[in-house]
Image (cartoon, rainbow, N blue to C red):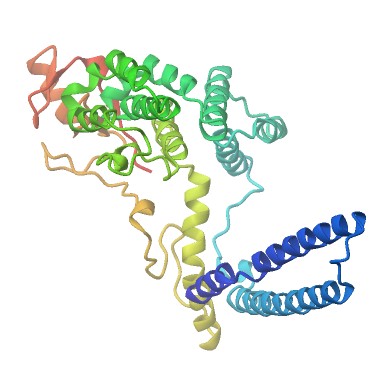
Amino acid sequence: MNIVQEEVERLGKNKALEKCIKESNDLLSYLKQKQEQLNQDTDDLKVQDVQIKINYWANQSLKHEKSLNTVIKKYQKSIDKVFNFDLSEVYRHRIPLESTRCRQLVDRALIMHLLRIGDFEAANTIAKMDNIQVPDQLLNKFHELEEISEDLTVHHRLEKAIAWANVNKHNLQRIGSDLQFNLHKLKFIDIYKKNPSSPYPAYEYAKINFPHFGNTHLDVISKLMSSTIFTPNEPENPYLDSIDLTSSPYQKLFTQLSRDFCSFVGLSSESPIFNTLQASYIAIPNFVKFNKISKMKNEKLDWTSENELPFEVELPKSLQFHSIFICPVSKEETTPQNSPMALGCRHLISKDSLAKLKKRNSSIKCPYCPKTFAANEIQEVQFI
């Protein structure tokens, strides 16, 4: 895959198309200028100069076209070389989609992915085809998420996101999320930058919303409030980094909100379909190599288990999931019958260990931190 990556980077670095567009726009501006001179019957217009300009543009455009075509051809050859294989030969243990159960599981994963990205029409079509019922309550939640997404990432409006965070503030605190503060911080910066002549609107907003976060974000709040001494774009402002909006903060905040939202409805922070495709892309070269070696030796190499690959695949940490959990109290591996349980502080212990703690007290004290919880604050954990 390194070859493909190199060609993608080379294609991205090629600026021939951008140069061609710029030079074409420059020529159009030049021709419009000459047209105005012609309409005014001025004697400054020289047809020979216009012809030279057009010929230069034509030659440069041809050079840019050749440069771009060369890079595209190399890219296509690299793609063809890397992906020149039969996928049915490379991976033997296919998902039996003829099985109704397997088909529904795959379609259910697709539906949840489509709901995450806001494609409700496609999700509804697949659900009807397989007669899968999506709860109205869950649909309404995803519709709300889509509305927040549009407001936040497209229109840069924070009101709906802040309202959602305020309603769910206790859940956000429970999982240790600082989403609510980050939204208020961005709203403060937005007000501050829209009122460069007066810091008072931003100050009033901070006075109402920042006191709740003094214990956890005092350092950031101090820098934000100190920045109001200066105008937003003043070069001498030592707090410019604190009020910088050039690093796509709206998209980053929505990503954080989306992860917290999925956590509340019992979903993983990332789409399983997305993770699967990403891991598959990384693993394909290993499958291809294994298949080639198998053919060279004129025999099928050992691959007897559906649940275990015959080779190692190096995946990034974001794609590494561990289904095995050892209870830190009992030192025993958890099982489906003795599943891991999450306390309100997010520490995990096994179900059996939790049962022993329950026998001693009506409330449960975490064995690793001084916090105490009621039984309804504890949730079962599933590793995937």
Residue lying at the far bottom of the rendered structure: 297
Picture layout, residue 325 above or below residue 185: below
- Answer left or right for 38 relative to 287: right
Residue 275, given in percent of the width and then of the height, sits at 47, 50
Picture layout, residue 298 above or below residue 48: below
Of residues 184 and 361, the one nearer the viewer is 184
Picture layout, residue 286 above or below residue 349: below
Of residues 290 and 320, the one nearer the viewer is 320
Residue 194, given in percent of the width and then of the height, sits at 45, 27
- Answer left or right for 29 relative to 202: right
Q: Which residue is painted at 47% across and 39% down in the image?
A: 251
Q: Which residue is painted at 45% across and 23% down in the image?
A: 161
- Answer left or right for 183 relative to 32: left
Q: Which residue is painted at 27% across and 15% down in the image?
A: 207
Q: Quadrant of residue 126?
A: top right
Q: Which residue is painted at 70% across and 75% down in the image?
A: 64
Residue 282, given in percent of the width and then of the height, sits at 47, 64
Of residues 130 and 285, the one nearer the viewer is 285
Q: Quadrant of the C terminus?
A: top left
Q: How many marks?
A: 0
Q: Quadrant of residue 174?
A: top left
Picture layout, residue 343 above or below residue 93: above
Q: Quadrant of residue 353?
A: top left
